[in-house]
Image: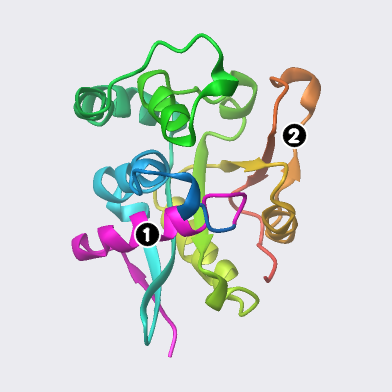
Amino acid sequence: MLTVRPFHADDLDSLYRISLATGLAGDDASHLYADPKLIGHIYSAPYALLAPDLAFVVEDQDGVAGFVVGTADTVAWEDRLERLWWPSLREQYALLPLSDPASRSHDQRRIAMIHRPALAPAAVVSRYPAHLHLNLLPRLRGRGMGARLFHHWLAALGRHGAKAAHVAVNRANSRALQFWNRMGFCDLPRESLPEGRTIWMGRPSAVSAGKE
């Protein structure tokens, strides 16, 4: 039986594990990282711990196999991370002075993100202030659980009064791009956004979402 429920504190290790298992454009990134928690430090754990009212998991007979996390106000969230989340991690992870980013290991690239987090573009957050991250292990894909998680998150977001949300998707992750399109997200105009591998997508929070 599959159950969608709010995040509990004892789910945190599962969020770290799923973040790593989906960290290579949706595929397993375990072989790329010496520290298995680095992806989760950025994309899941802070949301679950600092914004638990917008954190949900899906659980099957083998345990937690997917999650959705997010925030209703990206600008305020970035400020909150700067005050409450990044400082302790910066003490834990030293930033190596490498001149060529291409020569960095995957661990070093994530550590650089901890020390110099990229802020969401103003052109995105001005219209789509909320954002979210959603990941499923392969055993749950294609079963409608992504849509169920998103609907739970969307209902919770509505209680915060947010009018629109965005996602940032690696252009190599075709499965995620298709999913977010089905959920009603549209590509945002690229001329006002930085070039790179990220596709920015947005949608009003009140529009009915599709099915996975």
Residue 125 seen in the figure: yes
Residue, x 51% and y 59% (percent of image)? 135
Look at the numbered disc 1 and give the secondary structure of its residue. helix
Q: Position of residue 92 (x, y in %)?
A: 21, 29
Q: Position of residue 32 (x, y in %)?
A: 49, 46
Magenta residues? 1-26
Asked if disc 2 and disc 1 are in contact, CB closer than 8 Å, the reply is no
In the drawing, what numbered circle is on residue 17?
1
Question: Can you say which quadrant of the picture contains the N terminus?
Answer: bottom left
* Residue 151 drawn in magenta: no
Question: Can you say which quadrant of the picture contains the C terminus?
Answer: bottom right
Q: Residues within 10 Å of mark 2 (few under 14, many from 20)?
A: some
Q: Position of residue 77 (x, y in %)?
A: 37, 31
CA gap, disc 2 and disc 1: 31 Å
The quarter holding residue 90 reads top left
Residue, x 54% and y 77% (percent of image)? 139
The residue closer to the viewer here, 193 or 73, is: 193
Q: Is residue 30 left or right of residue 128?
A: left
Q: Is residue 117 left or right of residue 87?
A: right
Q: Amino acid at mark 2?
A: Leu
The residue closer to the viewer here, 212 or 160, is: 212
Give the residue number, with chain letter if any, for mark 2. 188
Q: Amino acid at mark 1?
A: Arg
The quarter holding residue 176 reads bottom right
